Amino acid sequence: MNEGHKKLQIYQQAHQLAIEIHAMTLKLPSLERFEEGSQIRRSSKSVSSNIVEGYALRKYKNEFIHYLFRAYGSCEETMEHL
């Protein structure tokens, strides 16, 4: 398994933020924790996941860029929910 993506600073930051956001959402009131919190957790984890998937396809430049834009979109979604 290629784990070269772990060397990317952007991946490291996205992964760390997903961990912090996950912990933060578990402290929300119950209604928000199960509805909005769940969506925030999914979108924040999608950022680093898309970076990993794009990195795996990096030899195909257009695919890599596609997944980086998806990561960016998930980041924007997370900020909107927060």
Image (cartoon, rainbow, N blue to C red):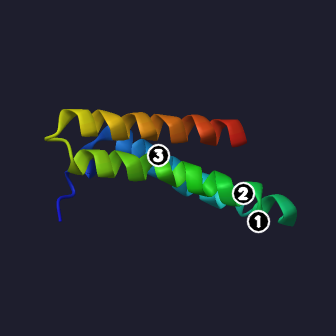
Q: Nearer the viewer, residue 7 or 62?
A: 62
Residue 21, compared with residue 8, is above or below; it is below
Q: CA distance from mark 2 to mark 1?
A: 6 Å
Residue 52 showing in the rendered view = yes
Residue at 19 percent across and 34 percent down: it is: 61
| Left or right: where 37 falls relative to 60 | right
Q: CA distance from mark 1 to mark 3?
A: 20 Å
The kind of secondary structure element at disc 3 is helix
Residue 15 rendering spot, x and y as whole percentages: 44, 51
State the count of labels. Answer: 3
Horizontal side, residue 15 vs residue 38: left or right = left
Q: First in sequence: mark 2 or mark 3?
A: 2
Marks 1 and 3, the one that precedes in the sequence: 1
User: Disc number at residue 47?
Assistant: 3
Nearest the eye: 13 or 63: 63
Q: What percent of the width, then of the height, locates residue 39?
A: 66, 55
Q: Residue at x 53, y 42 (%)?
A: 74
Cβ atoms under marks 2 and 1 closer than 8 Å: yes
Q: Amino acid at mark 2?
A: Gly
Estimate the x, y position of residue 8 in percent, counting from the top left. Answer: 28, 42
- Residue under circle 1? 34
Does residue 29 appear anywhere in the picture? no
Quadrant occupied by the N terminus: bottom left
Which residue lies at the image location 61% right of the left edge and 52% below the top edge? 21
Q: Residue 56: x, y in percent?
A: 22, 51
Figure quadrant of the C terminus: top right
The amino acid marked with disc number 1 is: Phe
Residue assigned mark 2: 37
* Amino acid tagged 3: Val
Which residue is painted at 24% across and 33% down in the image?
Answer: 62
